[in-house]
Structure formats: structure tokens, C-alpha cells
Image (cartoon, helix red, strand yellow):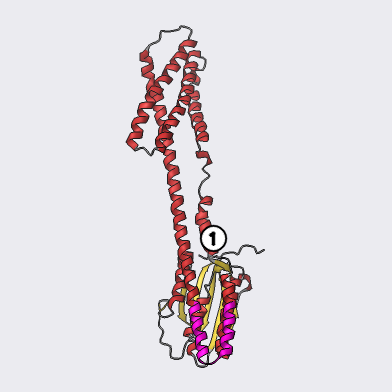
Amino acid sequence: MSASVADCVVHIELGSLTTTEPNLRFLRFWPLQLTGWGVYIGVNVLCSLPWWRRVDYDAFRGAFLLSIFLSSFPMYWLCHGLWKRRARLYHIAAVCLLASFPLGMLCAASAFQAALYFSRSRPPFHWVDIITATPSGWFALIAWVSFYFGIKHYLELLQKHRLLVETEMMAKEAQLRALRYQLQPHFLFNTLNAISTLVLQNQSFAATEMIGKLAHLLRSTLDAPDVHTIPLSDELAVTEEYLAIEEVRFRDRLSVRWDIDPSLIDTLVPRLILQPLVENAVRHGIARRPQGGFILVRTRRQGDCISLLIENEPPEESTSVLLDGIPHSGGVGLENVRMRLEQTYGPKGAMHTSTNASGNYEVLLTFPLTGSPPRN
């Protein structure tokens, strides 16, 4: 994935995460606390409507709901402390069961006290009534605790998933960056080797001219932003600069043809995706033909994909074999391109090599169309 595609993928997958994950603000304490208890109280009020004229019952139910709501706060501090200490599950269960029981009993006691206060007959106070009503408050608090830790574990899983995706994106980014950096010394070595050949052949003027063009190309590539994807127009400009270097070496033996769809020039493509292909065409095609030959660079739109084609005439004594679309020869360059397409686009990116009806070699790249950001 070119910077842009790596960035595209990192921002879509990774940056990704921020656009695909749900908004988690509602999972904060206060929204959940008020919403959960509001629903619980609402259900109790609806179920109590048949007795709404009984003041003692209303007092009992109201005091119970208020006290159970207030009891959730000490339980919150207890659960929060257990979570921060990363206590084991059995430890959490034991502590919360023990702590919630007296709170449930307190809720039952406050409810009965309120009922007695508003009752006309003022019946006597019995502890057995409180003990009988305690499980209601106890179970309500246990349900609250279970919900609290369920939300905590859910948020923790989301965080781990986010970190995992970010780690995978960083690993993919590093691999793409390594693949791209692999091309620069490879290309530089081959060009310097060509310059040394010109020097040995006493072609000092051609060697000097090639050195100047090489310096210009290196300046334009090394000074460029460290991105994985660039507009097709910029990639074509870099490829043209490289071919200009080779034209110094081959003169009239090298003919370059361009067949570019103008509507695709702003499409984002992996950086340095064409240079290793035309370099391969020069080294294994043009350089081995005494009379030289041509290299064709063509771009086409195929539905929601873009295709880049490099065609060149083969060496007269060629013994290269193309096996199922994978070049048998070609070295670092072609393998690098194949791996970058695979890393960037997955199954949607492909590289195929073949021999056409004219006997010329073709390398065809196909990958999804990605728009270029507006230029300043």
C-alpha cells in the first residue's frame, strides 16, 4: 500500500477503527447509571399502578427504589477498586456477594420503615419481614455488578482489538516501506553499473550525462514525501526520468511509447511501481537486442480497477520461461512489485506476465482505482 494506499488502508482499517467502531460515549458511567436505573424504576412504577392509591405501598416501593439506587454508588467504588487491582473472578464474586447482602438488607429496612411511617394502622416492626425482602435488593445489586463488569470486559476487548488492528497496520506499513526501500539501492546499483560500463568504453560524455540525470532522479525521489502512494502522473514522471537515463546509454536503440488515459492521471498508484518493470524490460529485453527495440507503457480503466501494461520486445535468443503468470527470470524488481501489490490490495491486486500475439513480453498490473487528494 503506497503511503496513500497504506495510509488509505491504515485510515480505513485502522484509522479505520474510528469510523467503523460504534460511538462508545453511551457506555460511560453516568449515561449507563441513569438509563439503567431509570428503566428499572419505570418498570417497577408500571407494575405498581394497581396499588397507586395505597400510600404505604407507594412509600415502600419508593423508598426501596431510592435506597437501591443510592446503594449502587458504594458498590461502584468497590467494583472500580477490584477492577483496577485486576482481581480474579472468584475474588470479585465473593467480595461483591458479601458486600451487596447488607446493602440489600438496608434497602429492605428503609422500605419497610417508610411503609410503617405512612401506614394508617401502624403495624409492629418485624425483622423477619426485612430478612424476607432482603433478596430483592441483593439480587438487584448483583445484577448491577454483573452489568458493570460485563461492560468493563466489553470495553477491554474493544481496546485489545483496536491495538491488534493498529499493530497489524504498523507491521504492514513497515513491510511496505521495506519493500519500497529495497528498490532504491537495487536501482542505484544497476544504474551505477551502467555508468561504469560507459566509462570502460571511453564514453565519458555519455557517462557524465547519465550521472547528471541520475542525480536529478535521485533528488526528485529522495526529496519527495515519504509516502506509499502517489498520483499516476508523478509515477509516470519518475519513470520518464529513469528512461531518460537509459536513453543516454542506448541512444537510438531504445524507443519509448506512451499510451496514457488522461482521465487516470490523478489515480493513486504505489510509488515506484513502474520503474522496476521498465528497468526489467530494458535489462532483459532492449539490452540483449543488437538493434534495440521499444518499450510501451499503457494505462487503461477496467471497471473500478486500473491496469498498467509494460510491453517490450524480447531478446532474440530469449530462453526465459513464463510460468502461470509468474516470471521465471526478472530478479528483485518483479518479485518486489508482486509482493507490494499483494500487501496493498490483497486479492484485488494482481500482476500477470505473458507473451502476446506479436511475441513481445507483457507485464500487466491490475488494482483498484483510488482517487488522489486535491493538490494545493
**In the image, residue 308 lies at what x, y percent?**
54, 74
For the residue marked with disc 1, what is the amino acid? Cys
Does 183 sit left or right of 261 as displayed?
left
- SS under mark 1: helix
Residue 13, above or below 132: below
Q: Is residue 186 left or right of residue 254?
A: left
Q: Residue at x 53, y 76 (%)?
A: 275
Foreground: 238 or 161? 238
Q: Main secondary structure of the magenta part?
A: helix
Query: In the picture shown, does residue 7 fall above or below 73?
Result: below
Q: Residue at x 45, y 43 (%)?
A: 155
- Residue in the picture at 35% in, 27% down: 98
Q: Which residues are magenta?
A: 187-215
Quickly name the residue at label 1: 8
Residue 374 position within the rendered picture, expressed as x and y whole percent measured from the top left: 64, 63
**Rendering coords of residue 261 (x, y %):** 61, 74
- Pick the residue in front: 43 or 164: 164
